[in-house]
Image (spheres, rainbow, N blue to C red):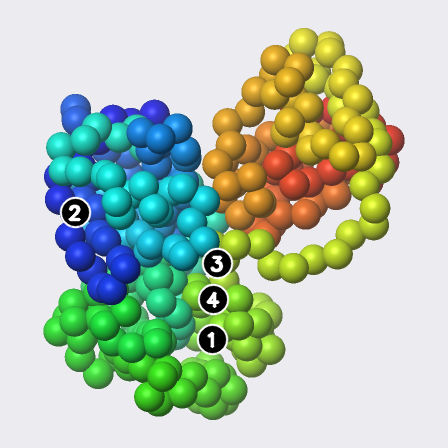
Amino acid sequence: MQQTVVDHIDRAAEDVVSLALRSASGPLAPWEPGAHIDLALPNWLTRQYSLCGDPADRGSYRVAIRNERLSRGGSEYIHRFLRQGRTLGVSLPRNHFRLEPAPAYLFLAGGIGITPLLPMLRAAAASGVPADLVYAGQSVATMPFADELRSSYGDRVRIVATRRQGRPDLAALASALPPGARVYCCGPPAMLAEAEAAFPAGRLHTERFHPAPKSFAPNEEFEVECARSGQTLRVPADESLLDVLTHAGRPVGSGCREGVCGSCEIAVLDGEPEHRDDIGAPQGRMYPCVSRALGPRLVVDL
């Protein structure tokens, strides 16, 4: 865990603040556009936020947080109680939303979904690759970094205030997509669903802040063997693998507990996991906060 100090808290839009987190000692870990960090808050909660600053700045990280009406305690604490000068623990950056090489890019942002896309647009522009951003929100006043984007990128950025203009026509954008272009989309579930319907799957990259609705067969009990200790544990149908490991003294770091952040990733040595995450676990890995076993037994590297 890296130690940072809250250097600035700025109002980025209605109900959105931007935090500048300065390193407490030495350079911070490097990151690439699309990465996020876990923020360990003083109220004992850990929350994930996309990095939206400059990857070349090794002295500080920038994140932006919307005050969610149904906050589980994270955004509410930041907006109401966090103060400049507070020391915060920050994880090493993780990236499940990497900017892949392409001859052109289209970035689609909805509200606070602008955060991972902001450094992507900056990187594309710096490399000279054609890139456009369509940024939608209820009104300009609710859209963080709208002025910064317009002043920096001009007509590459299209701001859509949906209360007045309606939602952007993603089907029309798909029909005009340049050959080989990649599309990166982050925003509310309705925007993501529309993007998935409009753009070819092989060219669309999405990131979710909350898991997509999914259905699975009823949970079944299974066994998990911890290879390093030789301990075998029973995972009941009504408990997650993550909780069973924690209760048995084999805790795994976790953040969202919803299969979207990737902080609880573990290696699977034998058996077939049932992947229920929204990230797309790499071969031989799984996220035990939500994923289970397709058979009666798993062997994990713990």
> Where does label 1 land, which residue?
180
Picture coordinates of residue 211 (x, y %)?
Answer: 57, 54
Q: Report the Cα–Cα distance between label 2 and label 3.
A: 25 Å
Q: Taking 130 as reference, is 247 left or right?
A: right
Q: Closer to us: mark 4 or mark 1?
A: 4
Q: Could you tell which of marks 2 and 4 lies nearer the N-terminus?
A: 2
Across the whole image, how many numbered discs are drawn on residues? 4
> Where does label 2 land, which residue?
9
Picture coordinates of residue 164 (x, y %)?
Answer: 33, 88
Q: Closer to us: mark 2 or mark 3?
A: 2
The N terminus lies in quadrant: top left
> Where does label 3 land, which residue?
207
Do callouts 3 and 4 mark residues in contact (Cβ within 8 Å)?
A: no
Name the residue located 35 percent from the left edge and 89 percent from the top edge. 165
Q: Give SS at disc 4.
A: loop
Q: In this picture, is 64 found above or below 112?
A: above
The residue type indicated by label 1 comes to Gly
Q: Could you tell which of marks 3 and 1 lies nearer the N-terminus?
A: 1
